[in-house]
Amino acid sequence: MSTVGLAATVALAVPLVIFGIEQLLAGEHLVGGIVLAIAALMVLIEEYLTTPTDIPGLVAEKTVGAVVEEPDED
């Protein structure tokens, strides 16, 4: 599910990146830089911020990891 969320965020950030680059090329450095920073923050926040919807998945991962033991190589 995290991959789908990241893909959706990137899909929303791409138009901002294009607009930011167009603004930079047009000479509007401040606007272009701000828009590019917003696009980068969107992706970084999605990737590294834990949201309330992520908590059940994290709990399930830890529970399964604690209950199920990896088999020995022998």
Image (cartoon, rainbow, N blue to C red):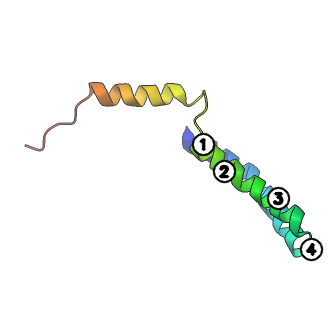
Q: Is residue 55 left or right of residue 59?
A: right
CA distance separating discs 3 and 4: 14 Å
- In percent of width and height, residue 18 lies at 81, 63
Residue 43 is tagged as 2
Residue 62 is tagged as none
* For the residues bearing labels 2 and 3, Cβ distance under 8 angstroms: no
**Which residue is painted at 32% across and 31% down in the image?**
65
Circle 4: is it few (<14), some (14-19), or many (20+) Cα within 10 Å?
Answer: few
CA distance separating discs 2 and 4: 25 Å
Residue behind mark 1:
4
Identify the mark nearer the N-term, 1 or 4.
1
Identify the mark nearer the N-term, 3 or 4.
4
Residue behind mark 4:
26
Identify the mark nearer the N-term, 2 or 4.
4
Q: Which of marks 1 and 4 is in front?
A: 4
Q: Is residue 5 left or right of residue 63?
A: right
Q: What element carries label 1?
A: helix
5 over 66 or under it: above or below? below
**Which residue is painted at 71% across and 48% down in the image?**
42
Residue behind mark 3:
34
- In percent of width and height, residue 20 lies at 83, 63
CA distance separating discs 2 and 1: 12 Å
44 over 26 or under it: above or below? above
Identify the mark nearer the N-term, 2 or 1.
1
- Three-letter amino acid code at the position of disc 2: Val
- Three-letter amino acid code at the position of disc 4: Ala
CA distance separating discs 1 and 4: 34 Å
